Image (cartoon, grey):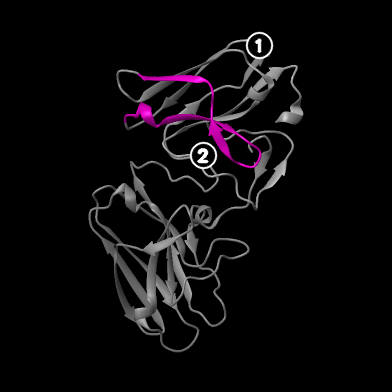
Amino acid sequence: WYQRRVRGTMSLFALFSLVVVVAAQPPPSGPTVTVSDQATSQGAVLSFTFTVEAKQGALDASKVHLAKASKEHKFTDARFTLDVSGESKLTVTVSGDDVTCDDQSGYIAYYDRIPPPPKQGPPAGSFMLKVAGCEPLRLAGGPPAGPKITVKNQETSQGASLSFSFELESRKDKLDTTKVHLVKASQDHKTSDVRFTVKVSADKTGKKVTGEVTADNITCDDQSGYLVYYDKLPPPPSSHMRFRRQPKPPPGGFFINVKGCSHNQI
C-alpha cells in the first residue's frame, strides 16, 4: 500500500491547523462566526471570545455551540463554559480551568448545526487551541503520534539469511516493548504477521527501543513492504488520495527486496 507516493487532499481536522482568524462566509441564511486561534499553557486558565453575527434579526443564544474535533473527524461538546450576550450580534466568552494536553485540538464554533465541510478553505468557525509543552498535533494522513521509528530498506537474496535492526525513540514517555510490532503489508492495505524472529529491548532510560530481526532461507514470498509500528496500526491512506508510481513509505515502513524475484509480486 505504501509502494506508491500519496498526495492527499486536506481533511477537516488538518484544515484547523491553518486557521489564524476565521471570518468565513456562511450560507445565506446563517450568521457569520468570527474566531481566532488560541494559545495557552498547561495548568493555565483559558479565556477568549468569539462573535456570531446575523445580517438581520435576533439570534438565539441557546443555539451557540462549541465542539472539539477528533482526528477521525468526529465532534464532541467542548468541556469549556460559554457565556453568551447580545441579540443580532452575539459575543461569546469561553472559559476553562486547568488546561491540559488533552485540550489541545481543533475546535469549531457554530450556530444551530455544524456546517458541512467546505470545498475549499477552513470551515466557518474553526480554530486551533495549542497548549505549550504538549506534543504537536499531527495532520490527518501525516506521521502518526508516538515514538520516532527508524528503519531502512533491506536487500537480500534467495536462500540467504536476513538480519537487520530498527529503532524507536520517545522524547518524553518510556516505551513498552510489548507494544512494538512488525507486520507484512499487501497492496489492499491488509497486514499479516511476519515469519521473522523479532527481539525487542529497551535502553536504561526506557525511551529508546531496538528491534533485532532475523530470518533464514529467504524466498521470493518475503519480498514485500513491511511496517514497524508502536501500539496501534496506523490507518491506511484515504480512498480520496491519488497515487503516483514512485514509492514513499510511511513512518516505520520499509521494503525487503529479494534479488532474482519478480517485482510483479509486490
Residue 30 versus residue 56: which sits nearer the camera?
Answer: 30
Residue 35 located within the stretch drawn in magenta: no
Residue 239 visible: yes
Is disc 2 surrounded by few (<14), some (14 to 19) or many (20+) residues within 10 Å? Answer: few
The x and y percentages for residue 52 are 42, 75
Q: Residue furthest top?
A: 160
Magenta range is 174-202
User: Label 2 is placed on what type of residue?
Assistant: Pro
Mark 2 secondary-structure assignment:
loop
The x and y percentages for residue 109 are 42, 68
The x and y percentages for residue 169 are 41, 26
Residue 114 versus residue 209: which sits nearer the camera?
Answer: 209
Name above or below for residue 48 compared with residue 140.
Answer: below
Q: Which residue is mark 2?
A: 143
Name above or below for residue 188 compared with residue 92.
Answer: above
Displayed quadrant of residue 120: bottom right
The x and y percentages for residue 190 are 58, 40
Tell me the CA gap for discs 1 and 2.
Answer: 35 Å
Considering the image in quadrants, where does the N terminus appear?
A: top right
Residue drawn where x is 42% and y is 43% of the image: 136
Residue 129 visible: no
User: Label 1 is placed on what type of residue?
Assistant: Gly
Q: Nearer the viewer, mark 1 or mark 2?
A: 1
Considering the image in quadrants, where does the C terminus appear?
A: top right
Mark 1 secondary-structure assignment:
loop
Displayed quadrant of residue 176: top left
Residue 38 versus residue 14: which sits nearer the camera?
Answer: 14
**Would you say 65 lies left or right of 152 here?**
left
Residue 159 numbered tag = 1
Residue drawn where x is 60% and y is 45% of the image: 237
Residue 11 numbered tag = none
